[in-house]
Image (cartoon, helix red, strand yellow):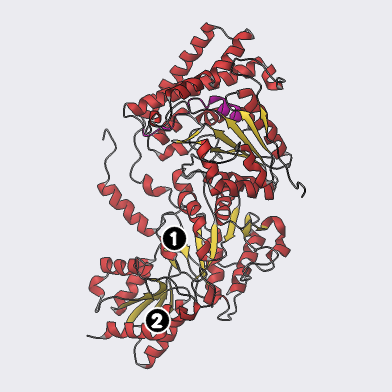
Amino acid sequence: MVEAIAMAHGWEMQHDPSVVVIGQDVGANGGVFRATAGLQARFGTDRVQDTPLAEATIAGMSVGMATHGLKPVAEIQFMGFMYPALDQIVNHMSRMRYRTRGRLTCPVVIRTPHGGGIHAPEHHSESTETMLCHIPGIRVVCPSSPARAYGLLLAAIRDPDPVMFLEPVRLYRAMRQEVSDDGQALPLDHCFILREGSDVTIVTWGAMTIETLRAVGELESQGISAEVIDLATLSPIDGETILASVAKTGRLVIVHEAARNVGVGAEIAALVAEHGLYDLHAPVQRVTGFDTIMPLFRLEHDYIPGVQRIVDAVQLTLTD
Amino acid sequence: MRTVAEFKIDYKQILDPRGEIVAPLPKFAADRGEVLRMYQAMTRVRVFDAKAVNLQRTGQLGTYPSSIGHEAAHIGVGAAMQPEDVLAPVYREFGTQLWRGVTMKEILLYWGGDERGNDFGRPKHDFAWCVPIATQTLHAAGAAMAFKLCKEPRCALAYIGDGGTSEGAFYEALNLAGARTLPVVFVIVNNGWAISVPVAQQTATQTLAQKAVAAGIPGIQVDGNDVFAVRETVGEALSAARRGAGPCLIEALTYRLSDHTTADDASRYRSAEEVKQAWALEPLIRIRQYLRSTGAWTEAEEQALLKDCTREVDAAVNEYLNTPKQSTDAMFDTLFAELPLHLREQRAIARKYGAKPRGH
């Protein structure tokens, strides 16, 4: 997936001279995960810039650049280091268009690694997308495959408003997939149905698609047909696709790596309670990270929901 | 042991508090028309300011941060900038904004609780008011980065207060600007007080200008009540930035003659004696004195100017008070380029339950 991300940068920089890549170690080093590999050699040090080691700087200068003709694609090296940038995201980036009645706009993409599972040090494995989803005026996107990373990143860069682009670290090198470098964007604000099914709907995103699809394989051997929806855009949520699926299956399981409390899963559950309650044959189930601190890596796979938890939750919805 | 770095901070004053010229007169100051233009602008913003405070006191405006006492700093900066430069204000620099073309009505709309005040007719490219302290300095650095990358001969100028210099974002902006030789000028308006905390309690440094030293950029202190010194210093800094010489930090020493905002009562934390002394140094007295001593300004002209300003302010106030409030759609319509579905649904709810505009 990481090559697909670098490829999407390359396509868009080639075709839109206003796109500029900034961040810590994105230049000669090509990013700590190699997501910007080769870009500086290709596009020069003006358009692919290492910034000082300061996240508020990265977000704040993005606001200044975006309001004055550029399209910054900024990397925050790890999601755990995003917090100094939040002031700029919440107070400026998200509301620039709104508060100036459209006079100034902020077409910024902030990319950041998301989630755990790669034996990283403390503060490198959190999934805090809920904090971002609560901010009006921005989009939050999380791809689950190389092809979707490519297409959604192109869409994010082309979007005239700020997009937070969360890249699941477990997926960076988890799978190989041919992605054609054709500049085709995928739609934002839309879910992707990864697998059709008739008994239960499972909504998930990012790296949890791995465990979910494995669980679905196991469920299939038990004669249970699950529909898997990749949420992809976490804010705003594509409610129509989810509600249509629940209307068909009558059961809903939500799977996410982030903590449960006020998680995106709660929003999805509320959406179905408000608009699809009478389609449900069983209570909604959530399979999530715990409401604890993401542990150091010896315990991280006990925190991240595993296949069996998902299988069990699905079976709960099928029990009378 | 040997010394590996040293610094010094210069202080500039041209027009002293008595209206005497104490340093070589800059070229613009030799042009009486230009001096008069600056004096008129300083008077204009002071008349506006008094009216705005009055509107708040009578319940016709929200909380308002008076700029009284800051006129030389604000007009000096405005006059030094080029129209194509970009201003990143804090929230008190009305003098600079009026000079650059923002209207009184726009200022009143914003402080009267209406986002349309941020939609400047001109200059279209200036940033709007920035309430989260010091964050605007990074916007100016970012805009300067855009000018540099796009090879446009433009500069950004960010204001910051003395209080804001304690914020991390301020140091980050100076650091970035220095490291990348950006065409940006930072102006600290040191008015002595961060709401109730005096400068001496905010920092151990002798000056705020020397905060530039750690960023490797020039820092200079000016008499912020001297419009000549401010304009000349900022003008030189902008010229240097425009020709690629990089950023500068300017500390303008002035005094906040008012409360922090209309929601504040400064008598709780500072003495009447201190304020009285500051009034003797305020910026209009000295330039008026200078104009009179050079024979270019009569009492009749002064009265005519005040009358003109009052007429202009009254007309703007009228226009502001007669602007109907926005419909509830305004909460939604400029949030995104294209409104997502859930917000279209919420917009419909707001339409149904929202308060109807006054007079409807």
Residue A178 visible from this viewpoint = yes
Q: Residue at x 52, y 58 (%)?
A: A159
Name the spot of residue B137 as percent of width and height, x first.
57, 44
The segment highlighted magenta reads B62-78
Residue depicted at x 39% and y 66%: A238
Which quadrant holds residue B324? top left
In this picture, residue B237 sits left or right of residue A245: right
Left or right, B316 with reference to A182: left
Chain bearing tag 1 is A
The residue that disc 2 covers is A196
Outermost residue to the right = B2
Chain letter of the residue carrying label 2: A
The amino acid type found where label 2 is placed reads Glu
Residue identifier under label 1: A132
Is B261 situated above or below A40? above
Q: What element carries label 2?
A: loop
Q: Where is residue A14 in the image (x, y as percent from the top left)?
A: 67, 61
Q: Quadrant of residue B48?
A: top left
Give the left or right position of residue B200, taking residue A269 as reference.
Answer: right
